[in-house]
Amino acid sequence: MVESGAPGKYHPLEFYQCPGCGGSLRKNPGDWECAACGTRFPLRRGVPMLSLEASKSPGFVGVMKRQHGNPDEFIDIAERQGWKAALRAIQVPGEPDRLLEAVAPNRVSWRHVVGLQPSSLVIDIGAGTGGVACQLAADCNVIAVDRSYIDAAFVAVRARQSCLGTLESIVADGCRLPICDGVADVVTLIGVLEWVPTDFPDRDPRLSQIHALREVLRVLKPNGRLYLAIENRSYFGYYLGMPEPHARLRYVSLMDQDTRDRYSRDTREQPFLELTHSLPDYRLLLTEAGFSRVDAYWLHPDYRMTHAVVPVDDAGISRWFTEHHLDPRRYSGPFHQSMYSFFRFSPPEFLAYSVRDYGFVAYAGRSDHHA
């Protein structure tokens, strides 16, 4: 549980290392410099660019197809008019409400399962608009990591305008974190792990994910925890024809690897790399990466705006939740009525394998540290 009290004082350079050689970093007026290899990492609007290679990630603005001739134009809006006004400026009717996603308290409704304390250091990988990082920074120390400059710069502006002195926003590669070994209490991967293989199209996508998870394990303390939120490959809705949310293809996640790859190449002219897994396969993936224990949760209705965090291994709680807290008003039309009936009347042991989004708490070190 989150304890009361203010977060501890934040000392950024205590946590960082050169992403190339692992040397210590020192601050200069216009960059951060590795004391060992001499590599200089420039500051852009005060944000340290701690990647070895320039990222092509468009950030959340690019994903929303909002084009700016210069990404700094969007950051200018955030600085002049406020970060909320900047989000409103790129909002289009009919799309998910980005401002709501950025401020909704249930973006961090899972926080009680990771044991945060005021002195905790959280590394939020793939920070986006800061909906998770900035809310957690009110209670503990946070390093917000994003491959996209526009995302990292936006989070920095938001943190500054919100007087969150316990948050540092950086541009970095999640598979090569500029973070020292064993310093983080919690690392979050929320809607991120499935995208990791897209950066390594010539590598087996599952191996790319294991590599990323081992990098997370490296920076966690011996009693640290990873919070992973991600979709379920075998979600019941996919059997009813709901498109897979990453590739936007029907039934693709239900196919074997070779078939879905051919399907994706035929329809999108690119391989299928946005890899998700079933419940037992996630447990296996995390165990192979080196985590000692994995607790699984059903995140209802999804991992972005979670209203309920239901332990999937507790059949009694799952049954109680489906019988007493699923709202039939959310399930209108034949498709959604089928979904409601499935969740409402399925046996808990079957339901646990078929929900939409999972949250996993994976433990570093020996599992008896967390009993």
Image (spheres, rainbow, N blue to C red):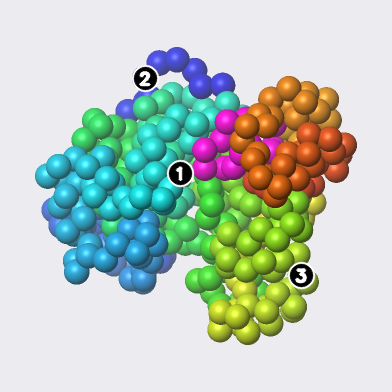
Residue 186 appears in the picture as rendered: yes
Q: In which quarter of the image is the N terminus?
A: top right
Q: In which quarter of the image is residue 255?
A: bottom right
Residue 308 falls inside the magenta stretch: yes
Q: Earlier in the sequence, mark 2 or mark 3?
A: 2
CA distance separating discs 2 and 3: 49 Å
Q: Earlier in the sequence, mark 2 or mark 1?
A: 2
Three-letter amino acid code at disc 2? Ala
Marks 2/1: CA distance? 18 Å
Q: Pinpoint residue 117: horizontal percent, then vertical percent.
A: 49, 24
- Residue 275 horizontal side relative to residue 26, left or right: right
Q: How crowded is mark 2: few (under 14 residues within 10 Å), some or many (20 or more)?
A: some
Q: Which residue lies furthest to the top in this view?
A: 4
The boundaries of the magenta stretch are 297-310
115 or 156, nearer to the observer = 156
Could you classify mark 1 by the number of other residues whose Cα lies within 10 Å: few (under 14), some (14-19), or many (20 or more)? Answer: many
Q: Which label belongs to residue 255?
A: 3
Given the image, on which type of amino acid does mark 1 rest?
A: Ile
Q: Where is residue 54 in the image (x, y as percent from the top left)?
A: 33, 71
Position of the C terminus by quadrant: top right
What percent of the width, then of the height, locates residue 94? 41, 51
The amino acid type, in three-letter code, at marker 3 is Met
Residue that carries the numbered disc 1 in the rendered image: 123
